[in-house]
Image (tube, grey):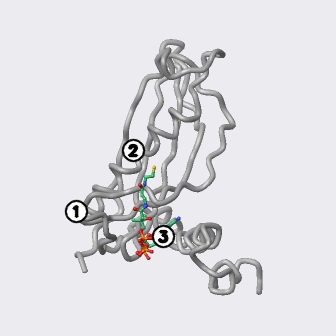
């Protein structure tokens, strides 16, 4: 098994500017473009941890509560929360800022991505465990097991009866 690696070593910040080709007719950033940028930032984060090629296995639900406007600066901040055998969960937060108006950045989106490290033939390969240091890292590490079980149940890869952490959450 690869040697454990600190969660903070995967920390990634990526910045983009919303240009006309990224928007809909209301001059708002299109959801698909946002997901594309989030995927790139999260993939870089997972690669920093795995030191391997990674593929996106799943994306948990993303809500679009706040429109991001043409000309805004969009910042993506991501970190690996936990590694299992070949898969890693990445937490990504998005904020947007109208720099020319001197406004503060506002939080717009967040999501959990799952990446799987693969070899040259695309077969899953083992990744390093994650070492947590801060309270936030420890909380995200702990809750990652629950989120993994939920996504595997929804993907039809785990029986609900095997999702012990999830069942415990509902007091069963
Ligand atoms: C992801 C992929 C490598 C998994 O391969 P597989 O043959 O199903 O491998 P396994 O069943 O051994 O699963 C490997 C890991 O993937 C995880 N995984 C598989 N499907 C998953 C899903 N839907 N959500 C979360 N994790 C998933 C498994 O839990 C396992 O994790 P672990 O090793 O940490 O326990 C394979 O399905 C694949 O290549 N998918 C396409 C990836 C891709 O092209 N992404 C871009 C899409 S646009």
Q: Secondary structure at mark 2?
A: helix
- Left or right: residue 89 versus residue 2 is right
- Left or right: residue 126 versus residue 92 is left
Q: Are marks 2 and 1 in contact (CB under 8 Å)?
A: no
Q: Is mark 2 within 8 Å of ligand 1?
A: no
Q: Nearer the viewer, residue 125 or 120?
A: 120
Q: Nearer the viewer, mark 1 or mark 3?
A: 1
- Give the vertical position of 105 relative to 40 (above or below): above
Q: Quadrant of the C terminus?
A: bottom right
Q: Nearer the viewer, mark 2 or mark 3?
A: 2
- Left or right: residue 34 versus residue 11 is right
Which circle marks residue 120 in the picture? 1
Alpha-carbon neighbours of circle 1 within 10 Å: few (<14), some, or many (≥20)?
few
Quickly name the residue at label 3.
141
Alpha-carbon neighbours of circle 2 within 10 Å: few (<14), some, or many (≥20)?
many
Q: How far, Cα to Cα, is label 2 from label 1?
A: 22 Å
Query: Mark 1 or mark 3: which comes first in sequence?
Result: 1
Query: Mark 2 or mark 1: which comes first in sequence?
Result: 2
| Coordinates of residue 11 in the picture (x, y in percent) | 35, 52
At 46% from the left and 42% from the top, the residue drawn is: 38
Quickly name the residue at label 2.
41
């Amino acid at each position: 098994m690869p040697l454990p690696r600190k969660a903070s070593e995967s920390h990634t910040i990526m910045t983009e500017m919303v240009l006309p080709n990224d928007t809909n007719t209301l001059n708002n950033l299109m959801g698909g473009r946002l997901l594309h940028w989030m995927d790139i930032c999260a993939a870089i984060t997972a690669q920093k941890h795995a030191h391997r090629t990674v593929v996106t296995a799943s994306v948990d639900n993303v809500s679009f509560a706040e429109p991001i406007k043409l000309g805004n600066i969009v910042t993506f901040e991501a970190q690996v929360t936990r590694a299992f055998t070949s898969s890693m969960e990445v937490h990504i937060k998005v904020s947007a800022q109208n720099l020319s108006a001197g406004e503060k950045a506002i939080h717009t989106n967040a999501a959990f991505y799952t990446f799987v490290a693969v070899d040259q033939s695309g077969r899953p390969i083992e990744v390093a465990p994650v070492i947590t240091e801060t309270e936030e890292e420890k909380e995200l590490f702990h809750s990652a097991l629950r989120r993994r079980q939920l996504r595997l149940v929804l993907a039809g890869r785990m029986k609900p009866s095997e999702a012990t952490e999830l069942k415990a959450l509902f007091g069963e």
